[in-house]
Image (spheres, rainbow, N blue to C red):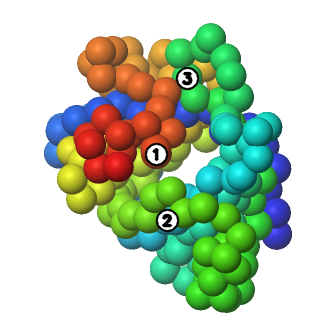
């Protein structure tokens, strides 16, 4: 099974997990899962591939590989073309990718996933990075709506990818 779409998201840095979970429950967001994800991000060589990555993910019982191309935009959100597919053998796929591409980042994140009206809220923690919120939506207006409803600090909103997040906290 594959998925082809554009991802629209922001990260909200340094959130209070307990307060945020309370607010999400108050607005009727449904807690979907606790999650532990191992991610490896690869850079793609070549002049035209500066904003392209290959992401390999390992979730309990589910392995996937995703092509992501960050789109240049003046919008206050990260927009990326995203094409993903499940893989059956994580270790062999990782071995292949390690031989073809340049490994940029490998990390484990733990978090909780909430969903409200198609909007995905991921409260995540990565070693060395304070807990943050990812909001993934279908439209930019929806982000603005939830920033207001959840009373999120606009000064902590970023349209960063994982690499920029790691650089900000001086982990790469």
Depicted 98 relative to depicted 69: above or below: below
Numbered disc 2: secondary structure: strand
Given residues 130 and 15, the one toward you in this image is 130
Q: N-terminal of the two: label 3 or label 1?
A: 3
Question: Label 2 belongs to which residue?
Answer: 39
| Tag shown at residue 162 | 1
In the image as oriented, which residue stretches furthest toward the top? Answer: 74
Query: Can residue 106 be seen in this snapshot?
Result: yes
Q: Residue at x 71, y 86 (%)?
A: 88
Q: Give the x, y percent position of residue 18.
A: 17, 45
**CB within 8 Å, label 3 to label 1:** no
Q: CA distance from mark 3 to mark 1?
A: 14 Å
Depicted 49 relative to depicted 76: above or below: below
Q: Of tags 3 and 1, which is closer to the observer?
A: 1
Q: Residue at x 61, y 40 (%)?
A: 118
Q: Give the x, y percent position of residue 102.
A: 60, 61
Circle count? 3
Depicted 134 relative to depicted 95: above or below: above
Depicted 19 relative to depicted 31: above or below: above
Quick check: 83 left or right of 160?
Answer: right
**CB within 8 Å, label 3 to label 2:** no
Quick check: 165 left or right of 23?
Answer: right
Q: Quick one: label 1, few (<14), some, or many (20+) residues within 10 Å?
A: few
């Amino acid at each position: 099974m594959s998925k082809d779409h554009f991802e629209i998201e922001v990260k909200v840095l340094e959130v209070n997990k307990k307060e945020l979970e309370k607010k999400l429950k108050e607005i009727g967001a449904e807690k979907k899962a606790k999650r532990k994800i191992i991610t490896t991000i690869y850079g793609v060589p070549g002049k035209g591939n500066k904003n392209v990555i290959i992401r390999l993910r390992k979730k309990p019982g589910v392995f996937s590989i995703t092509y992501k191309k960050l789109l240049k935009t003046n919008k206050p959100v990260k927009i990326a073309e995203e094409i993903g597919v499940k893989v059956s053998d994580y270790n062999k796929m990782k071995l292949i990718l390690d031989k073809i591409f340049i490994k940029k980042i490998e990390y484990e994140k733990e978090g909780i996933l909430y969903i409200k009206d198609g909007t995905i809220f991921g409260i995540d923690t990565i070693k060395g990075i304070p807990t943050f919120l990812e909001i993934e939506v279908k439209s930019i207006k929806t982000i603005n709506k939830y920033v207001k409803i959840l009373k999120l600090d606009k000064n902590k909103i970023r349209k960063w990818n994982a690499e920029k997040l790691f650089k900000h906290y001086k982990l790469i």
